[in-house]
Image (spheres, rainbow, N blue to C red):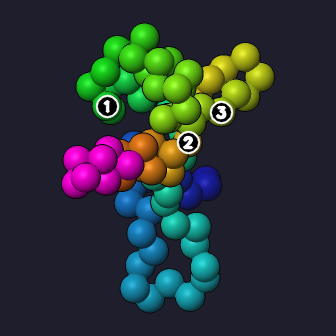
């Protein structure tokens, strides 16, 4: 007979244990969002998102036929909004 290991189907933390000696990969956040996700993040509609891209205020990246928004570009857009409010 072979031993069977019980495996939990629950999600696990990606954090290594304090005693871990290997360099386990660290979890990363989302790097890119599609148009609908970006619109939801910014509480705007798709048309407004495309308008911001058209005017150069929000940077979009094409991957094949898809339009995606890099997380750092969304953050930069929001930082620019705060700068505009301060003026």
Q: In which quarter of the image is residue 32?
A: top right
Task: Residue at the far left: name it.
Answer: 86
**Residue depicted at 55% across the width and 42% down the height:** 70
Q: How far apart are marks 1 and 2 (CA)?
A: 14 Å
Q: Mark 1 vs mark 2: which is more N-terminal? A: 1
Q: In this view, does 42 lie to the left or right of 46?
A: left
Residue 83 versus residue 18 in the image, above or below: above
Return the x and y of residue 26 as percentages of the image width and height: 52, 67
**Residue depicted at 37% across the width and 23% down the height:** 39
Return the x and y of residue 30 as percentages of the image width and height: 48, 45
Q: What is the number of the mark on residue 2?
A: none
Q: What is the number of the mark on residue 61?
A: 3
**Residue depicted at 31% across the width and 53% down the height:** 83
> What span is colored magenta in the figure?
80-87
Task: Give neighbour class at mark 2: few <14, some 14-19, many 20+ (Cα, 10 Å).
Answer: some
Q: In which quarter of the image is residue 23?
A: bottom right
Q: Which of 39 and 28 is in front in this view?
A: 39
Residue 84 versus residue 19 in the image, above or below: above
Q: Nearer the viewer, residue 43 or 2?
A: 43
The secondary element bearing badge 2 is classed as strand
Q: Is residue 53 left or right of residue 41?
A: right
Disc 3 to disc 2: CB gap under 8 Å: yes
Residue denoted by label 1: 42
The answer to whether one can see residue 3 in this image is: yes
Please check the rendered image and state whether residue 54 is part of the magenta-colored stretch, yes or no: no
């Amino acid at each position: 007979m072979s031993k069977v290991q019980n495996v939990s189907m629950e999600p696990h933390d990606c954090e290594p244990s304090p005693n871990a000696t290997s360099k386990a990969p660290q979890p990363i956040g989302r790097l890119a969002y599609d148009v609908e996700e970006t619109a939801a993040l910014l509480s705007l509609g798709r048309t407004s998102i495309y308008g911001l891209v058209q005017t150069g205020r929000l940077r979009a990246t094409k991957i094949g036929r898809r339009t995606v928004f890099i997380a750092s570009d969304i953050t930069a857009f929001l930082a620019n909004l705060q700068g505009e409010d301060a003026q």
